[in-house]
Structures are given as structure tokens and as C-alpha cells.
Image: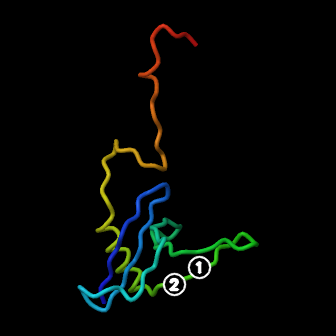
């Protein structure tokens, strides 16, 4: 089994899990919209889910412990590195103070 991870950048970064029978083959399953979450027991793979009317989340997919370990390892290896000062879209702010003329008083 070959597991590949494709990270998707954006407001809410996530990744797709593509599983194929062996390296070089087309994936026979793709799980879109996964992410790494942190819970009380540590990090885990957050598979696609939907919030129900009672406020709870219904998961569309579950993975075995072995599969989840492989996905977690591959996701961490494939995760794009960011420098500390590089802004993300989620927390992006722009400083306009350089564009304000000095003679304007507030």
C-alpha cells in the first residue's frame, strides 16, 4: 500500500490522503479535507465530518490505528515548512502605518 499526502493551503489548511496499491499506480481512494488536530490525548487525524443538528460531529471515515499512524507520519513529512515571520492566510494582517503621512493627527 502506498499513502501520499497533498497539502492544501488556504484559510483553513488541510490535506488529502491518496491511497494506491503500490508506488506509481493511480490512487484507488482519495480522502479530502483531512487535518491534524490536537486533543486531550495528543495529536490525531481529523477526517471529514459534518456537524449534526444536536451540535455533535458525525465522522464520514475512520481509520485503524496502523493506518492513522502511517497517515500522521506522511502528513508531517509532507507538511510545508513556514518561517516564523511568514504570514498565513488565517492570521494575516497588514500594517498600513507606513502609508500614513506624518502630518496627519489622530
In the picture, measured across the screen, residue 74 lies left or right of residue 68, that is left
Q: Is residue 97 above or below residue 46?
A: above
Q: Position of residue 90 (x, y in %)?
A: 49, 50
How many residues crowd mark 1 within 10 Å: few (<14), some (14–19), many (20+)?
few
Q: Which residue is mark 1?
A: 59
Q: Are marks 2 and 1 in contact (CB under 8 Å)?
A: yes
Q: Which mark is residue 82?
A: none
Q: Position of residue 8 (x, y in %)?
A: 41, 64
Tell me the CA gap for discs 2 and 1: 7 Å
Most distant residue in the left direction: 24
Corner quadrant of residue 43:
bottom left
In the picture, measured across the screen, residue 56 lies left or right of residue 29, that is right
Most distant residue in the top direction: 103
> Dot 1 lies on which element?
strand
Most distant residue in the front direction: 26
Q: Residue at x 37, y 74 (%)?
A: 72
Question: Which quadrant holds the N terminus?
Answer: bottom left
Question: Which quadrant holds the C terminus?
Answer: top right
Q: Which residue is mark 2?
A: 62
Amino acid at each position: 500500500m502506498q499513502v501520499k499526502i497533498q497539502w492544501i493551503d488556504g484559510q483553513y489548511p488541510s490535506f488529502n490522503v491518496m491511497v494506491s496499491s503500490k508506488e506509481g499506480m493511480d490512487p484507488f481512494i482519495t480522502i479530502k479535507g483531512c487535518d491534524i488536530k490536537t486533543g486531550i490525548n495528543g495529536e490525531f487525524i481529523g477526517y471529514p465530518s459534518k456537524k449534526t443538528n444536536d451540535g455533535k460531529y458525525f465522522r464520514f471515515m475512520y481509520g485503524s490505528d496502523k493506518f492513522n499512524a502511517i497517515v500522521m507520519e506522511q502528513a508531517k513529512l509532507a507538511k510545508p515548512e513556514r518561517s516564523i515571520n511568514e504570514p498565513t492566510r488565517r492570521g494575516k494582517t497588514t500594517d498600513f502605518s507606513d502609508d500614513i503621512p506624518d502630518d496627519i493627527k489622530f
